[in-house]
Amino acid sequence: MKLTTLLLKIIDRINDFVGRCVSWLTITMVGMVLIIVVSRYFLQLGSIALQESVTYLHAAIFLLGIAYTLKHDGHVRVDIFYRQFSSRWQAVINLLGGILFLMPTCILILVASWDYVFASWSIWETSAENNGLPFVYLLKSLILLMPATLFLQGIAEILKSVLTLHGQFNIDKSSHLPNASDNPSLIP
């Protein structure tokens, strides 16, 4: 179980780090939209590359932030019954949902988009616009990173559910994993 707890902490920390980094892209995107609006409507200047960069940032925020959102239980959930269930039943629902829906969906997205992304890389795909960004292949690579990070977080959520069912984890709290300072044996 110590290895499981360590794996949970590693996955959670990776997705926390990615999510926190991606959150700064939101501020950057808002600043860029402000620059676009001011330059276009007040200075009569336009930049296709700047407009496309907002699209790239928007895609990065959603595709890389999805695992962070899962970790913090921020996805929309029809919880008419779920919230009234005990943490044990919530763990059963989360476990089944992760195994039956989340993991297969991640695998499907990864497999289905592999050729699409590879084709983009093989021709170093660029923007269709003359002055657009020449990094479309990098943007499309995010389509592969999204299911990878989501799959990792799915593993963590499934493990949390299993630990909850074994009475070693409380699904209602976010600070239930022991820290290395709490248990020196968790330090690698």
Image: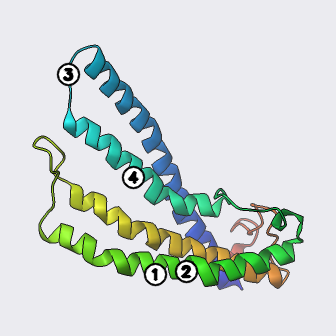
The disc placed on residue 154 is: none
| The disc label shown at residue 107, or none | 1
Q: Position of residue 53 (x, y in %)?
A: 29, 42
Residue visible at 82% across and 85% down in the picture: 166
Q: Is residue 119 visible?
A: yes
Q: Is residue 59 above or below residue 77?
A: above
Contact check, label 2 and label 1, Cβ < 8 Å = yes
Of helix, strand and loop, which one carries label 4? helix
Rounded to the nearest angstrom, the CA distance separating label 1 from label 4 is 20 Å
Q: Residue at x 45, y 71 (%)?
A: 147
**Alpha-carbon span between mark 2 and mark 1:** 6 Å
Local packing at callout 2 (Cα closer than 10 Å; few below 14, some 14-19, many 20+) is: some
Q: Residues within 10 Å of mark 1 (few under 14, many from 20)?
A: some
Q: Position of residue 40 (x, y in %)?
A: 26, 22
Disc 2 and disc 4 in contact, CB within 8 angstroms: no
CA gap between label 2 and label 4 equals 22 Å
Helix, strand or loop under label 3: loop
Type of amino acid under label 3: Leu
Circle 4 Cα neighbour tier, 10 Å, few/some/many (<14 / 14–19 / ≥20): some
The answer to which of marks 2 and 3 sits earlier in the sequence is 3
Q: CA distance from mark 4 to mark 3?
A: 25 Å
Q: Which residue is mark 3?
A: 45
Mark 3 neighbour class, 10 Å CA radius: few under 14, some 14 to 19, many 20 or more: few
Can residue 188 be seen here? The reply is no
Q: Are marks 2 and 3 in contact (CB under 8 Å)?
A: no
Q: Earlier in the sequence, mark 1 or mark 3?
A: 3
Q: Which comes sooner in the sequence, label 1 or label 4?
A: 4
Which residue was labeled with disc 2? Answer: 103
Q: Earlier in the sequence, mark 2 or mark 4?
A: 4
Q: Is residue 44 left or right of residue 10?
A: left
